[in-house]
């Protein structure tokens, strides 16, 4: 009989949740149930058990990587006899709409900030680098919001480059999910954190370098470690529709919400609208642009139908 080579030939080592949980070692649980309540996204079901079994081992792994990176930075500065500012460790977090990226990012921020050698951890979502609604409407791509062409990639690359150069007081536009737009005149200031988590749909893209100038940069060029939150497309579709129902009863009720027109839909109407938005916008973006970047991540969190992580894949050295 031939051995099963499905994973043996992979660039990744695959762990069950139980196997991964044992790699926590003695990493202490520093979050409470109350903390987790504030970190969960709408309609997300992450539990303290999942934090212990999935995210504590991940925070330990990242802490080791950050320490090694800081050591390498010091060694290079010593060799060059320079005193350049310490570069923040950049962690990229990618995945589909409704897969739970934002909750994962907030949990990782909270856990990483509790390690003593890098207490200043900040978080940026690439939503702030979306073109304003006015620009998207002028270009006729409002229905492609979230696709690569809807982002100001030059501004994102400039920001990431400045972060890596150790610059201080960097301004990131604030994005409002209520108005579905960037907020004029409002910025989130990033001031030389030890670790910066960047969360977004398309941050792992590298494009076709053969058709680009050799000096062309992509967001993915700047990350020290990357995580992809993964799930079956059918599961994500269901989670998206469930989230739409939850938003209909909460955020959509606000008259200033861009989606206020959906607040009074019946259940049948809401399911039809949500399914259509998923089919016409989010699923094509996932299949064409996001999912193809999955295998570029250093680590993949594989979620099951109940929204919890069941397997972890770690890229082999």
Image: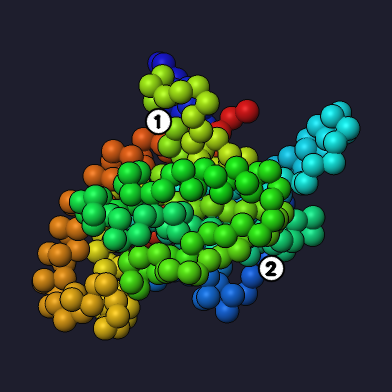
Dot 1 or dot 2: first in sequence order is: 2
Q: Position of residue 135 (x, y in %)?
A: 30, 55
Outermost residue to the top: 1
Q: In this view, does 49 lie to the left or right of 78?
A: left
- In the depicted view, which residue is nearer to us: 55 or 271? 271
- In the depicted view, which residue is nearer to us: 207 or 114? 207
Question: For the N terminus, which image quadrant?
Answer: top left
Where is mark 2, residue-wise? 30
Q: Where is residue 3 in the image (x, y as percent from the top left)?
A: 44, 20
Where is mark 1, residue-wise? 207
Q: Which residue is drawn at 29% across and 60% down?
A: 134
Tell me the distance, in whole angstroms, between the alpha carbons under discs 1 and 2: 39 Å
Would residue 289 be seen by someone viewing this image from the given angle? Answer: yes
- Image mark for residue 165: none
Q: Where is residue 226 in the image (x, y as percent from the top left)?
A: 55, 43
* Secondary element at tag 1: loop
Residue 46, compared with residue 288, is above or below; it is: below
């Amino acid at each position: 009989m031939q051995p099963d080579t499905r994973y043996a030939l992979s660039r990744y080592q695959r762990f069950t949740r139980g196997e991964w949980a044992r790699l926590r070692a003695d990493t202490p649980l520093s979050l409470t149930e109350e903390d987790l309540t504030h970190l969960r996204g709408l309609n997300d079901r992450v539990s303290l058990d999942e934090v212990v079994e999935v995210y504590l081992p991940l925070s330990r792994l990242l802490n080791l990587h950050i320490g090694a990176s800081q050591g390498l930075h010091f060694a290079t500065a010593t060799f060059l006899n320079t005193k350049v500012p310490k570069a923040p460790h950049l962690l990229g977090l990618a995945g589909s709409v409704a897969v739970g990226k934002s909750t994962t990012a907030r949990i990782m921020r909270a856990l990483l900030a509790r390690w003593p050698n890098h207490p200043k951890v900040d978080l940026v979502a690439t939503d702030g680098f979306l073109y304003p609604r006015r620009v998207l409407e002028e270009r006729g791509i409002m229905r492609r919001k979230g696709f690569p062409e809807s982002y100001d990639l030059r501004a994102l690359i400039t920001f990431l480059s400045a972060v890596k150069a150790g610059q201080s007081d960097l301004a990131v536009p604030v994005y409002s999910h209520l108005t579905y737009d960037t907020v004029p005149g409002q910025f989130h200031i990033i001031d030389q954190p030890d670790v910066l988590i960047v969360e977004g749909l398309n941050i792992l893209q590298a494009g076709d370098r053969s058709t680009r100038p050799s000096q062309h940069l992509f967001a993915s060029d700047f990350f020290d470690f990357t995580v992809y939150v993964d799930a079956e497309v059918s599961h994500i579709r269901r989670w998206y529709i469930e989230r739409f129902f939850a938003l209909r009863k909460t955020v959509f009720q606000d008259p200033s919400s861009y989606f206020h027109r959906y607040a009074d839909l019946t259940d049948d109407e809401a399911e039809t609208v949500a399914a259509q938005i998923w089919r016409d916008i989010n699923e094509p973006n996932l299949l064409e642009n996001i999912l193809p970047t999955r295998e570029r991540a250093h680590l993949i969190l594989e979620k099951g139908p109940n929204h919890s992580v069941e397997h972890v894949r770690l890229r082999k050295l």
